[in-house]
Amino acid sequence: MNKMSLQIYIITTSVILNLIMNNKIFLWMTLEIATISFISMLIMSKMYNSSIIYFIISFISSTILFLGMLVYPSANLNMLIMVGILIKTAMFPFNYWFNLMSKSLNYLNLGMLMTLMKFIPLNIMHLMIEMNQFLLPVIITSMIMSPIMTINKYSLKLILSYSSIHQTSLMMMMMYMNFYMFIMYFSLYTMVTMNLVILLNKSSNTLKYEYNSINKKNKIIYFLYMIVYSYFPPMSTFILKWTLIENMILMNNKYSLAAIVVMLSSFVMIWSYLNFMNNNIYKYNNFNKMFKEKSSMNTQKKLFMIWMMTLASLMYMYFNF
């Protein structure tokens, strides 16, 4: 096991321990262990500026969070916990550092920041903070602003970072409605994201359009992963989002506006991904030739996994509608 794999293992273990613990001190400790491991990953990748930015943000958010935990469950100071977590998860209006960092990270580190590094703060929020009149507007604002900021963006890393903010706001909403559905959604989101960033990390480049140097055989896989990642129907990712919207509509009038925002913001996010693919895939004359070429065994495995995701969603629709 190399040093990078060891840090990923430590972060994953911290996430699992955080999920099964309820003691607030242990919750905070797992958060700090994961933070130190991620900063170590950045240093190993020679991303020193990003490591300094993340250290400063983590120091500020963890200090606020720890102070809030000391006086928990004081209703007047629960706002400290909420603010600390909103900074850590890069929710609006604390998202600038996340978008700034995303441009300088490699895809693997960006994937870790978008997935596993967000689980522990979200779980702490679920255990200590109830949905309130301050949190709901922040979630809805993040849902609205993040898709709007992706319009006419041609940097894939920026699109992914804003998409992560959008997904985080959805998961915040989901975990207060059904925590088990949140776990399922987060697991699928993590799996799809990590597969996408691993593919991108192998073919990353410094060009503006970041797609140009991906080799020909991987373009079709990349295209399909983008479809899955954009939560486009009938993929299984879309079904989970549809379930969230359905539950929000059925609950009460409190979430009716939020349900409309989820639908509209999701359409804008899908449009942004389609626009990016239109500018970076369809313009290539050899795109149609990719479908005629013989695929390698590795390519076939990736296609099979994507096909299984689609099949799972179709089976869900068949048995529930």
Image (spheres, rainbow, N blue to C red):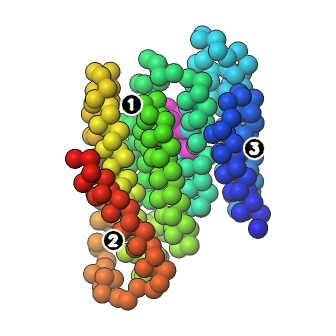
What residue does disc 3 label? Answer: 33
Looking at the image, is mark 1 or mark 2 nearer the viewer? 1
Residue closest to the eye, 123 or 89: 123
Image height of 84 relative to 30, above or below: above
What residue does disc 2 label? Answer: 281
Where residue 223 sits, quadrant-wise, is bottom left
Residue closest to the eye, 307 or 82: 307
Sequence-first disc among 2 and 3: 3
Q: Of helix, strand and loop, which mostly describes the magenta segment? A: loop
Q: Residues within 10 Å of mark 1 (few under 14, many from 20)?
A: many
Residue closest to the eye, 134 or 119: 119
Circle 2 SS class: loop
Task: Examine the rendering and report whether any part of residue 241 can be seen.
Answer: yes
Image height of 21 relative to 114, above or below: above
Sequence-first disc among 1 and 2: 1
Label 1 sits on what residue type?
Answer: Ile
Label 3 sits on what residue type?
Answer: Ile
What residue does disc 1 label? Answer: 140
What residue do we see at 64% from left, 11% from top?
74
Label 3, label 1: how far apart the Cα atoms are: 30 Å
Image height of 178 relative to 279, above or below: above
Label 1, label 2: how far apart the Cα atoms are: 32 Å
What residue do we see at 60% from left, 10% from top?
76
Please tell me whether residue 42 belongs to the stretch shown in magenta: no
Q: Which residues are magenta?
A: 90-98
